[in-house]
Structures are given as C-alpha cells and as structure tokens.
Image: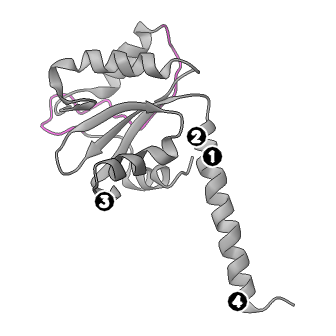
Amino acid sequence: MIDVQSAFKLKAIKSHKKERRAKAALDAADGQKVYFISDAQTGLTKIGFTVHLGKRLAEIAWALERPQDDFKLEGYIITPHGMGRALEKALHTRFAKDRDNGEWFNLKGHNCLHEALEAIRGLGGADWPIKGLASDYSGLSEPRWAMSKTEQIRLAKGGA
C-alpha cells in the first residue's frame, strides 16, 4: 500500500513529465515558428523565429533581465522546415518603418494577421497554421490579439 506522501510525489512526477511532453510537442510541431511577443513595459512587439517556442519567452525575459510576466506570446505561425527565417525577414521588411530597435516593432494600429497572410503568400505558402493573431484591430490605438490570456499562459508554459 502507498502512503499519502508517496502518492503526492508520484502525482507530481507524472505532472512534470506530462508538462515536459507538452512542451516538447509544441517545440516539435510541424517546423519553425515565427512569433509575436509583446512587452508590457514598452508596448513594443518582438517578431522572431524559433524551433523551441516553449523556451523562447523565458530566454527573452532572461536576456533583458526582466520578469517573464512582462512579456506575452501574442501569436505565432508554424512554417514548413526551413521557412522560418524567410517569413521572419519578410515580416521585418513589412514593418521596417515601425522598427524601434533590432527585432522590436511598434505595431499599434497594424493588422498583423493581414500582414502575416500577405507575407506568407509572398513566400508561396497557403496553409501555414496561424495561432493567436487577431484580424480586427487595424486602426486601433493598441493591437488587439485573438489569443486569450488562458491560451497565452498555457503556451508560455509549453502546452500545445
């Protein structure tokens, strides 16, 4: 018979393994991801690409020496293998006049879904999955993202 303390330890181990599997599944899903991560402190949005989306948010916070809660994953596009850099570059070119610093852009009033779709079409893509980008915030003073806070938290923790 298992005592209560052992049962709790076993449950914690299973939960940790499940979380690791979910993060690995997100990282391995179909290819590279081009992401949009917003900074609550500056109002800017980083457009970048990674294979390991589950880790990227934490890396950005660590590199900027800020709490991870300052940053939100607003959405991402899953690209076929080898197309992540090309889409990232195409989006950087589309938003060049709004570049603040490096890969950080002021996207207030932009329709990122429309811009992403145009960039994808320009690269010959048709059905690349897009997660979280809203289509209805063009012309607003602040971008409105389609991903709910719950989805942002789940993805930031590595859920698929």
Magenta: main secondary structure:
loop
Mark 4 lies on a secondary structure that is helix
Labelled pair 1, 2 in contact (Cβ < 8 Å): yes
Residue at label 4? 5
**Residue found 38% across the figure and 50% down from its top:** 148
Q: Counting residues from the N terminus, which is met first, the one under dot 4 or under dot 1?
A: 4
- Residue 90 falls left or right of residue 6: left
Look at the numbered disc 1 and give the secondary structure of its residue: helix
Give the spatial CA distance, label 3 vs label 1. 23 Å
- Marks 2/3 in contact by CB < 8 Å: the verdict is no
Q: What is the C-alpha distance between the residues marked 3 and 4?
A: 33 Å
Q: Position of residue 63 (x, y in %)?
A: 33, 48
Mark 3, residue position: 67
Label 2 to label 4, Cα distance in Å? 33 Å
Q: Which mark is residue 24?
A: 1
Residue appearing at x 49%, y 54% in the figure: 154
Q: Which amino acid lies under the numbered mark 4 shown in the image of this protein?
A: Gln
The kind of residue on which mark 3 rests is: Pro
Q: Secondary structure at mark 2?
A: helix
Please report the bounds of the magenta region as a residue range.
124-143
Please state which amino acid type lies under the numbered disc 2. Asp
Amino acid type, mark 1 = Ala
Residue at image position (69%, 75%) is 11
Quickly name the residue at label 2. Answer: 27
Image coordinates for residue 89, horizontal then vertical, percent: 36, 18
What's the CA distance linking mark 4 and mark 1? 29 Å
As drawn, is 23 to the left or to the right of 154?
right
